[in-house]
Image (cartoon, rainbow, N blue to C red):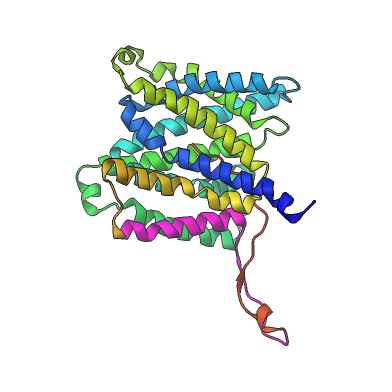
Amino acid sequence: MSASETRRPETRGAIELTAAMLLSGTIGVFVVESGASPFNVVFYRCVFGTLFLSLYCVARGFFKNHGFTPKKLALAALGGVFIVFNWAFLFESYGKTSISVATVVYHTQPFFVVLLGAALFKDRITAHKAGWLIVAFLGLILVSGISSSDLSGDSTYLVGVGYALLAALFYGLSTIITKRVTGVKPHLVALVQVTLGIPLLLPFTHLGQSAHFGSGWAWLVGLGFIHTGVMYVLMYSSYQKLPTSKIAVLAFVYPAAAMVCDWAVYGHHVTWVQALGIPLIVAASLGINLGWRPRLRPATTQTDSTQTASLQPAATSGKRTTV
């Protein structure tokens, strides 16, 4: 097999993941334009997402030899509890901060995965991971843009940032639970989770408001079919073709696209101070996902190329999903 034939699947995977992340960046616009409350949005996202994924899994024959055991099904369902409430809190944060700020704050997810792993499974937090957590925290302080007036006066903005962090926490919980569901197609795991979301969110959903959605229905259908159907299919397909390093890098197309959409549609933009925090969070997230660590070699008789400090990628904790 030639080198070009070897690279072809990886190139296709990069295109698929980029497309999925670009679609992710438009989620905030679909949520806001629907005009529905966050819990109503998530409820109907689950309804239409269940319809799409059910048809897709039937067409692909995924229900044959599905690989579920009672334990795996229970873990998938538990992960679904956290993933649907993660959506609800993220969507709630859009209206209290902005799509841009909420999305960037939400991308502290990898650090919650590390902290939860340490708290629940006694995973060791190494020195380099602790360093990246500090970098991420500094970036979070800058990106959040919280001022003294937010602390002493109207706390809406502060609450919005808190919702985005809570969404990231719930995403982290879903990640560490769902990654233990092995030997099952991810499409089936996602189907279980969105199907569970329908009865789970029903008590929080105001169905009486549905009659007044009007054109908002088109946005809600889009969230289910496009962002919970097409986007997931593209994302899972790309994961089979790409190394973890490329997945980690391309994942940041999502917040970049969200910021562009927020600026183009609503005129929102981050301040210069907030902009300073974005590369810190990006670098820290990549450092955690790729295991970057500074490795200083002793200056002996080695060549110059081995005397310099370098960032060495190590094993990662797995592939990431999105909202």
The answer to if 277 sits in the magenta stretch is yes
Residue 117: % across, % down: 60, 45
Displayed quadrant of residue 162: top left
Quadrant in the rendering for residue 184 = top right
Q: Position of residue 169 (x, y in %)?
A: 48, 41
**Magenta-highlighted residues:** 273-302
Give whichever of 47, 115 is nearer the camera: 47
Residue 97 showing in the rendered view:
no
Confirm whether residue 56 shows in the render.
Answer: yes
Q: In front: 39, or 114? A: 39
Q: Is residue 257 above or below residue 89?
A: below
Please, is residue 311 above or below residue 57 in the view? below
Q: Residue at x 72, y 23 (%)?
A: 66
Direction from residue 144 to residue 237 in the image, left or right: right
Give yes or no for residue 137 being in the magenta stretch.
no
Residue 207 in the image: state x and y as whole percent.
36, 13
Residue at image position (44%, 38%) is: 167
